[in-house]
Amino acid sequence: MTNDSSPHILIIGGGIAGLSTAYYLQKKAAEQGRSLTYTLVERAPTFGGKIKTSTARGFVIEGGPDSFISQKPWAYRLCRELGLGERLIGTNDDRRKTYIVHRGRLRPLPDGVMLIVPTRFAPFALSPLISPWGKLRMGLDLFIPPRRDDADESLADFITRRLGREALDKIAEPLMAGIYVADPYRLSLKSTFPRFIALEQKYGSLIRGMLAQKKARAQAEANGHAPPKLPLFMTLRGGLTEMVDTLVSKLTGELLTGQAVTRLEHRPAERRPYRAHLAGGQTRLANAVVLATPAFVAADLLEPHAPALAQTLRTIRYLSTATVSLAFRRAEVSHPLDGFGFVVPKSEDCRLMACTWVSTKFNHRAPADHVLLRVFVGGYKREGLVDLPDAELLSLVRAELRRTMGLTAEPVHHEIYHWRRANAQYDVGHLERVEAIERAAAAQLPGLYFTGSAFRGVGLPDCIHQGEETAARLLASLPPADSV
C-alpha cells in the first residue's frame, strides 16, 4: 500500500484541486527522478467535487461548473496534456449576448461592454439599460484620479467610486453574482479582480485601460504576433466529467472514494508525522498532508492541534446555491434564445440569480429540435431557496421563466442539484486571511498544505493551478531522496 523507504503523501479531498495536486505530484516526481507514494481520499462516492455531468436522454447537463475561462491557461493546458485537445469546444461566440432583467424585461447588455466597462460609444449610448445620468457618471471614470493606497476594498466600493452606483446595481452586481454568488459589498477586489486594480493604477481609468488593451490586441493580431485566439469560455464535448475521468485514469497512487477522514493526528517526533483515521477504521501514515477540502472541513480536522488556525479557517464563509436544468421541445419555446442567457439584479422582483441558455451557448448539449436551459437560485440574495423541496423549486423556477421569458411549455426533462455550503466567499481581506493561515500552518504543522476554491481562486483554472503549485512546493520541501 505504501513504500516505507519513500515519502508518502496524503491528499484529503478529491475535487479538481485534489486531483490536480495528485496528478502534478506524480508528474513532477517522475520528472525529478523522485520516488514517492500517495493516497487520495474522497468522502463522496466519486471524484470530481462540484463537477457533475449527466447525459440523460441525449442532453449534456452540468450540475456544477459548465466551462472554464481560457484566459487563465491552466485548465486548457491540462486538457491538452490529458489528450483531450480534440474534445475541447468553445462557446458559440457569434451568438454571444447577455441579457439583464430590467423592470421585468430582458434588456441586452450593450455591445462592447468588457467585464462591466463600456468600450464602444454608440451601443452604450443607445442602450435603455442605464439612464442618461448613469451613462454620464460612468464616463467620469476618465477623469477620476486613481486611489493611492493599496488597502483591499470591496468590489461594490470600487465600482461605485469609478463608475457610479447605477453601473454597480444594473451591471456589475448581477454579472459578478453569477460568478461568485457573492454580495459585492463584501467581495474582496484584490482576491477576485486584481485586473481592475492594475488598470486603475497603470492607466488612471478603467475605460482608458480597457481601450488601450483592446487596441494592443488588435495591433498584435494585425502584425501576426498575437497567440491563437481561443473562445473565452471552453468545455469538453461530453461535459467536464470527461476531464475528471481522464485525470483519475492517469493516477497511479492509492485512490479511495466513499471514505471520510475522521481524525488527523500530528506526531512531530515520528518519521511520518501525520496519521489519518478513516471512517472505516483504517489509518494512513504520511510525511505530508494536503487539505483540498472546504475550509470548514479543514478546520474540524485541525482543531485539536491548532485551534487558532482552525478558527481563522472558519472565518471563510460559504453560501449555498442550486442549479435547475430544464429541457424543452424547441417548437414549444417562443423565445428566440438569441444569446447565452440572462442575469438578474438584486433590485428586481425575481427569485432567480441567472439563467443560461445552454444549447445556444454550446453545441452538442441537446438533441435536435430540443433546447436546454439552466437556472441558478440561492446565493447571497435568496439562499433559503436552496432548501426547498425539488417539486417546489421546480415550480418556482418555471413561474419565473414564465414571467421573464414567456416560457409556458412543459419541460420534457429536468435535473436539480443542491450545493449546500459549496461556494467559498472571498470577503474583503481574504488574501491576508489566506496568508495568515499558511503562515500558521508552516509554523505549527510543517508538511501541511492547503489548496482549493477556499483560498486563491474559485474557478477551475485557479483550482488546477493551485494544485500544481502545491505539488511543486511540497516536493521542494521533501528531504533529498538519499536521506529519506
Image (spheres, rainbow, N blue to C red):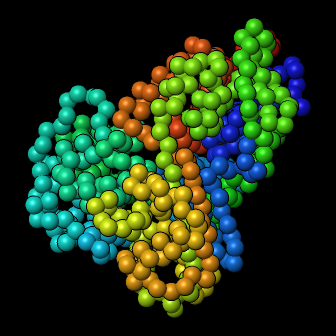
Residue 113 percent across, percent down from the top left: 28, 61
Quarter of the picture holding the N terminus: top right
Point 55% across, 47% down: residue: 422
Point 24% across, 36% down: residue: 201
The one of 210 and 457 positioned closer to us in this rendering: 457
The one of 465 and 482 positioned closer to us in this rendering: 465
Q: Residue furthest toward the top?
A: 269
Q: Is residue 334 above or below residue 473?
A: below
Q: Is residue 363 above or below residue 143?
A: below
The one of 71 and 151 positioned closer to us in this rendering: 151
Q: Is residue 304 left or right of residue 221?
A: right
Point 69% across, 73% down: residue: 56
Report if residue 123 is visible in the image.
no
Point 64% across, 46% down: residue: 16
Figure quadrant of residue 130 = bottom left
Residue 106 percent across, percent down from the top left: 32, 74
Q: Residue furthest toward the bottom?
A: 331
Figure quadrant of residue 402 = bottom left
Q: How many marks?
A: 0
Report if residue 371 is visible in the image.
yes
Q: Is residue 79 left or right of residue 339?
A: right
Figure quadrant of residue 299 = top right
